[in-house]
Image: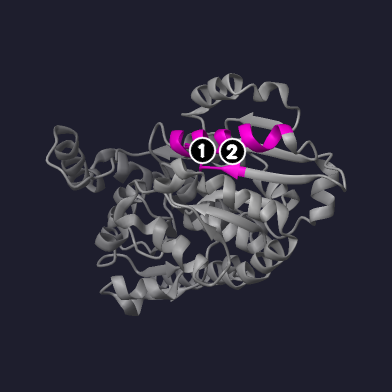
């Protein structure tokens, strides 16, 4: 029986790939013992229990490039957390055969502690440019799983790197568009535009989307617009929704979070999304025409790199936040709504960014690492 600890969180972009890996292991080995490790207040506190897995907690904080009191505290936590009683107790109580991280500051304490203890370790990096945690962990962990081959150039321990793609939860790619549309009650003559700015949402993206809907929704009754505003931004979004009198438009839906995202993406004709690597992998796997909006607030501007890679190959339309005031988002949406040929071109080209084998490749790596670890323990 395999015992697996997964760690990574803060945002859905780190939690969902970890859940995808866990689900793949559970599907292939139903008796496997699987648990998650996160931080209190992160998106994992919601998503992991919903997926049916136990969740432990450690202390960890994001580190920024400043000497603020909060950042000094985060640095101190980074130094002490791998050695804390809380972290060590998780390892000694659960006794994992492998620890797998999916990036972000959340995965640092446990992966570092597991590496110290001689437990097999892997980390998955979904973005083109690796985050700080992966850059530091590369020296101690065993395997670095990558979505982009280009990511190797940013790392020194390239012999540890394996390109596998991004793991996706089971619904992505397994739900037919017609079935999804029927389940959601979308008519054959309706167009679905799905808008999301990530698990936490974005006040600026929500405002731009709602301004777009103010223009488009009243004049396009056969187009259904769905906005996932994010749990931290839903109240502001709902206030604008009412101010713009979009509550009088039955074809506009604003909600805090979309839990059935595979179904919604399968049904969508157009997706407007942040350019996080996991979000892009999801729409690529489903072959959707999309508008991508990179967040300018992430480290090393990695979302712009992700989005530019797709736009350069005519696989998506790129809109930057700095262009919101000029109506760029509305123009991009109108272009896709009114030009079926453009939609078809994007749908075809974005498929080249999908990797349907990622879950299987990661699972095979996990099994091999665990088998080797158990054999080594048995013979020692």
Considering depth in this image, is 164 or 143 the residue closer to the camera? Answer: 164
For numbered disc 2, what is the local secondary structure? helix
Q: Residue at the spot x=64%, y=63% of the render?
A: 285
Q: Estimate the spatial distance between the alpha carbons at disc 2 and disc 1, rounded to whole Å.
A: 6 Å
Dot label at residue 52: none
Q: Residue at the spot x=41%, y=41% of the render?
A: 10
Q: Residue at the spot x=51%, y=65% of the render?
A: 311
Considering depth in this image, is 271 or 182 the residue closer to the camera? Answer: 271
Label 1: which residue? 208
Quadrant containing the C terminus is bottom left
Q: Name the spot of residue 289 as percent of width and height, x first.
A: 65, 59
For numbered disc 1, what is the local secondary structure? helix
Q: Name the spot of residue 338 as percent of width and height, x first.
A: 72, 54
* Residue 26 in the figure: left or right of residue 84: right
Dot label at residue 212: 2
* Magenta-colored span: 195-218
Q: Are marks 2 and 1 in contact (CB under 8 Å)?
A: yes
Q: Is residue 291 above or below residue 366?
A: above
| Residue 366 visible in the current orientation | no
Q: Is residue 310 above or below residue 261?
A: below
Quadrant containing the N terminus is bottom right
* Residue 184 in the figure: left or right of residue 75: right
Q: Main secondary structure of the magenta part?
A: helix
**Is residue 277 part of the magenta span, yes or no?**
no
Q: Residue at the spot x=25%, y=67% of the render?
A: 139
Other-residue count near label 1 (Cα within 10 Å), few / some / many at <14 / 14–19 / ≥20: some
| Residue 280 visible in the current orientation | yes
């Amino acid at each position: 029986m395999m015992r697996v600890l997964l760690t990574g969180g803060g945002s859905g972009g780190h939690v969902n790939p970890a859940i995808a890996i866990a689900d793949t292991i559970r599907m292939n080995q139903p008796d496997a013992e699987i648990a998650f490790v996160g931080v209190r207040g992160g998106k994992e506190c919601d998503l992991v229990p919903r997926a049916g897995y136990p969740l432990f907690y450690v202390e960890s904080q994001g580190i920024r490039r400043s000497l603020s009191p909060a950042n000094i505290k985060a640095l101190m936590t980074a130094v002490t957390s791998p050695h804390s009683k809380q972290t060590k107790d998780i390892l000694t109580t659960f006794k994992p055969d492998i620890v797998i991280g999916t990036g972000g500051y959340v995965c640092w304490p446990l992966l570092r502690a597991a590496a110290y203890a001689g437990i097999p370790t892997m980390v998955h990096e979904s973005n083109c440019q690796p985050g700080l945690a992966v850059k530091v962990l590369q020296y101690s962990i065993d395997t670095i799983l990558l979505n982009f081959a280009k990511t190797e150039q940013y790392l020194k321990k390239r012999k540890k790197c394996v390109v596998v793609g991004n793991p996706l939860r089971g619904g992505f790619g397994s739900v037919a568009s017609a079935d999804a549309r029927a389940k959601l009650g979308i008519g054959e003559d309706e167009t679905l535009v799905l808008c999301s700015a990530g698990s936490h949402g974005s006040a600026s993206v929500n405002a731009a989307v709602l301004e777009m809907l103010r223009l488009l929704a009243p004049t396009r009754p056969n187009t259904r617009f769905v906005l996932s505003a994010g749990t931290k931004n839903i109240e502001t979004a709902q206030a604008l929704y009412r101010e713009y009198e979009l509550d009088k438009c039955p074809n506009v839906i604003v909600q805090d979070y979309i839990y059935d995202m595979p179904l919604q993406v399968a049904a969508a004709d157009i997706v407007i999304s942040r350019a996080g690597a996991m979000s892009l992998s999801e729409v690529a796997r489903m072959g959707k025409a999309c508008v991508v909006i990179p967040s300018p607030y992430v480290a090393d501007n990695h979302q712009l790199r992700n989005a530019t890679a797709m736009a350069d190959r005519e696989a998506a339309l790129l809109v930057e936040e700095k262009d919101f005031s000029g109506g760029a988002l509305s123009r991009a949406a109108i272009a896709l709504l009114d030009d079926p040929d453009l939609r078809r071109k994007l749908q075809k080209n974005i498929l080249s960014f999908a990797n349907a084998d990622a879950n299987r490749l990661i699972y095979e790596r996990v099994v091999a690492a665990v088998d080797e670890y158990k054999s080594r323990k048995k013979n020692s």
